[in-house]
Image (cartoon, rainbow, N blue to C red):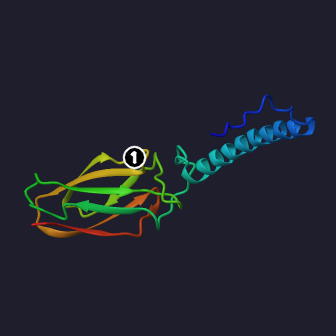
C-alpha cells in the first residue's frame, strides 16, 4: 500500500503575493461599504415615506373617492361611508390635507375624519331620510377631485 505524501512545511509566500492578498481584502471591504451605501440611497429614494405636512403637492388625477355601501335605507340611521384618498404624483398619501364633500342638502354628513391621516385618507359618514340617488364630489383646499360618485338612499 502506498504511503500518502505529506509535506513537512510549506514555503513562505512571496512578499508581493501577500501584499496582493491584503490589498484585495481591503478593496473588498471598501466595495462592500460602497454597495450598502448605494443600496440605502436607492431604498430611501424609491421606497421612502411620504413627506410630512403639506410639502408634497396633491396630484388630483391620482386621488380618488369611494363609497361603501353604495346603497342604504333612507331612515336617517343607516350610513354610507365615503373615503377619500389624497395622493401625490407617486401615489403616496399626503397627510394633513382638509377634504370637503360637496353634496345635496338632504344628506347629513358626519366629518368622521376630514383631515387626511399619514396614508392620505379622509373619512365621512352620510345618512339621509329622503330616498334619492345623490352625486358626491370632493375637494382639497380649492381644488375639486375629478372623480364623482353616486350613492343611493332608498
Q: Residue at x 16, y 54 (%)?
A: 79
Using residue 146 as the reference point, say whether residue 18 is left or right of it.
right
Using residue 41 as the reference point, say whether residue 23 is left or right of it.
right
- Which image quarter is the C terminus in? bottom left
Q: Nearer the viewer, residue 115 or 130?
A: 115
- Which image quarter is the N terminus in? top right
Q: Residue at x 47, y 59 (%)?
A: 142
* Residue linked to disc 1: 115
Q: Quadrant of residue 46?
A: bottom right
Against 67, residue 125 (above or below) is above
Q: Residue at x 35, y 48 (%)?
A: 114
Against 145, residue 116 (above or below) is above
The x and y percentages for residue 111 are: 29, 48
Q: Nearer the viewer, residue 12 or 30?
A: 12
The x and y percentages for residue 54 are: 53, 48
Q: Given the current orientation, which residue lies at the most extreme top position?
A: 8
Against 23, residue 102 (above or below) is below
Q: Residue at x 46, y 52 (%)?
A: 93
| Number of marks present in the image shown | 1
The x and y percentages for residue 58 are: 51, 58
The x and y percentages for residue 43 are: 59, 49
Using residue 25 as the reference point, say whether residue 20 is left or right of it.
right
Amino acid at each position: 500500500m502506498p504511503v500518502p505524501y505529506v509535506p513537512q512545511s510549506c514555503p513562505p509566500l512571496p512578499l508581493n503575493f501577500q501584499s496582493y492578498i491584503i490589498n484585495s481584502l481591503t478593496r473588498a471591504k471598501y466595495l462592500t461599504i460602497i454597495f450598502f451605501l448605494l443600496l440605502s440611497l436607492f431604498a430611501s429614494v424609491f421606497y421612502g415615506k411620504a413627506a410630512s405636512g403639506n410639502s408634497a403637492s396633491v396630484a388630483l388625477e391620482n386621488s380618488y373617492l369611494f363609497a361603501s355601501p353604495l346603497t342604504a335605507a333612507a331612515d336617517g340611521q343607516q350610513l354610507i361611508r365615503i373615503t377619500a384618498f389624497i395622493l401625490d404624483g407617486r401615489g403616496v398619501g399626503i397627510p394633513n390635507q382638509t377634504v370637503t364633500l360637496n353634496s345635496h342638502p338632504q344628506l347629513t354628513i358626519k366629518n368622521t375624519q376630514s383631515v387626511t391621516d399619514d396614508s392620505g385618507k379622509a373619512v365621512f359618514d352620510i345618512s339621509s331620510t329622503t330616498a334619492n340617488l345623490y352625486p358626491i364630489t370632493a375637494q382639497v383646499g380649492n381644488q375639486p377631485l375629478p372623480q364623482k360618485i353616486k350613492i343611493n338612499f332608498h
